[in-house]
Image: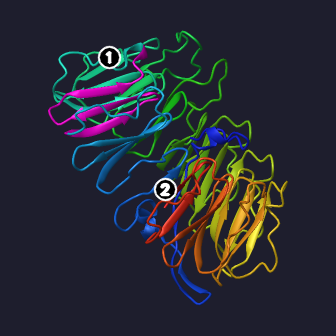
Amino acid sequence: MANGWNPRNRAENSKMRVEISIIVGICVGSVAAVRRPSESDAASRIVQPSGTIVGWGGQIIGVDLSREFVSVAAGGWHSLGLKTDGSIVGWGWNTHGQATVPDPNGDFTAIAAGSWHSVGLKSDGSIVTWGLAYSGRLDVPEPNTDFVGIAAGSFHTLGLKVDGSVVAWGRNDYGQTDVPAPGTGFVAIAAGLYHSLALKSDGSVVAWGCESLQCPTFPCYCEQEAQVPDSSTDFVAIAAGAYHSLGLKSDGSVAAWGCSEPNTDYGQCRLPARNTGFVRIAAGYTHNLGLKSDGSIVAWGNNHAGQTNVPTPKTGFIGIAGGGGHSLGLRSDGSIIAWGSNRFGEANGPAPNTGFVSVAAGWGHNLALRTGGALVAWGNNDYGQADVPTPDAGFIAIAVGDFHSLGVKDTGSIVAWGRNDDGQTDVPEPNTCFIAAAAGAWHSLGLKADGSVVAWGSGLYGQTDIPSPNADYVGIAAAGTYSLV
């Protein structure tokens, strides 16, 4: 599930999801020898060889994301990282102190992040909370001992005890802290916007929260969030949308329950007619996707932009994802199919859609790289961002910003085009020895074969201020107002 993207709002765009792409190569003179990343490189996409992540810009500037992290948690606008020494690092929006870990910062074994509060579990079984205290979400009930698990919702908190019981506190206007009796035998917990989930050792799921037709502010048009469907056993995976939940069972069937938005019914809780053979599930904001063992995709729920109309042929898929108003399917042949919101034609895949090795998406346009080194671009072209410069050949890597595009050539140079009001397409000299590129909303990055990074474009949030020493980097990424290497 993803939030809407506003290309005009730089502060909101700083929350954009990023992915680090890695291309390893050697520059000899002006020639780059490049190995494209494979699936085996996936773990390397978020860390350096030393296990560190370096960040700069509006969202995480000044934070030491060094090695030895063992778990992470994402809140509304802040993040937490747990280290092997039991300390916690917090970063992001800190208006209520949710990113400021209280002293003593040690002996933590688990972390959880809500919208504006944070939760840490200590090795002695006690819980520490910090951030916005409104609605009592920080008030851990006594006795504050024997906890083995934690979860944080938007306005409430859950704790799992060693005896399998669940303790809940905080906002309760939807019943999200009313743990059903007998409240024992649980092994895992999760917290949503207005509801709570707990998994039992027998594979059953218990949920509580928003009651059908009883929610104080809006009605639920699906089954209650507090009512997991009958035969609630043998769940192997769960997924949560804005106001609804999904569960995948060991027999390949899907269960769905929860609420829609106020005064609407999108049908995201009405199960597919042939509810069998599923191997993966995904929940968008108000729609769902299910991947079957035969490689087909079933989609249901909100279809205002056609996000549940899976294109034909509906086979050969190996991955799925659900967004706010669009859907993605990854095919086994390496092609990517997109459908749903298509204001600028961004969901119109290129034809013929074969032979692609890489794809990149901007706010309203896309780039795809072919095996022969040519590029295909489509979608929004208000600033010429979809007009690939000639000669269209010899490309080895691509990147897309909001309204500009980047292509790395096999000569080691970067070609940039599209919107340029912040200089994001003015590649600095010497334009040689580049092996990878990344594009943010108004800035660009280039990775050199010697491990150094070059940045250009808007530096309003420090996103072009590369930390020292600028060496030994193997991957780069850029978002709205920050950068990662």
Q: Residue at x 40, y 65 (%)?
A: 48
Residue 293: mark in rendering: 2
Q: Earlier in the sequence, mark 2 or mark 1?
A: 1
Q: Residue at x 35, y 35 (%)?
A: 112
In the rendered structure, the answer to whether residue 292 lies left or right of residue 146 reads right
> Does the magenta segment cover residue 119?
yes
Secondary-structure class at tag 2: loop
Residue 485 appears in the picture as rendered: yes
Q: Which residue is mark 1?
A: 180
Name the main secondary structure of what is drawn in magenta: strand
- The kind of residue on which mark 2 rests is Ser
Q: Position of residue 221 (x, y in %)?
A: 59, 20
Decide which of 187, 409 is in the foreground and name it: 409
Q: Residue at x 64, y 56 (%)?
A: 314
Q: Is residue 59 above or below residue 357?
A: above
Region in magenta: 107-134
In the rendered structure, the answer to whether residue 179 lies left or right of residue 5 reads left
Q: Do the residues bearing badges 2 and 1 touch, measured as CB atoms within 8 Å?
A: no
Secondary-structure class at tag 1: loop
- The kind of residue on which mark 1 rests is Pro
Q: CA distance from mark 2 to mark 1?
A: 35 Å
In the rendered structure, the answer to whether residue 354 lies left or right of residue 207 reads right
> Does the magenta segment cover residue 409?
no
Residue 239 appears in the picture as rendered: no
Q: Residue at x 21, y 48 (%)?
A: 85
In the rendered structure, the answer to whether residue 222 lies left or right of residue 178 reads right
Q: Position of residue 66 (x, y in %)?
A: 35, 55
Q: Position of residue 415 (x, y in %)?
A: 72, 72
Please identify the quarter of the rendering in which residue 67 is found.
bottom left
Callout 1 crowding tier (Cα within 10 Å): few <14, some 14–19, many ≥20: few
Image quarter (top left, top right, bottom left or bottom right) of the N terminus: top right
Q: Is residue 446 above or below residue 348?
A: below
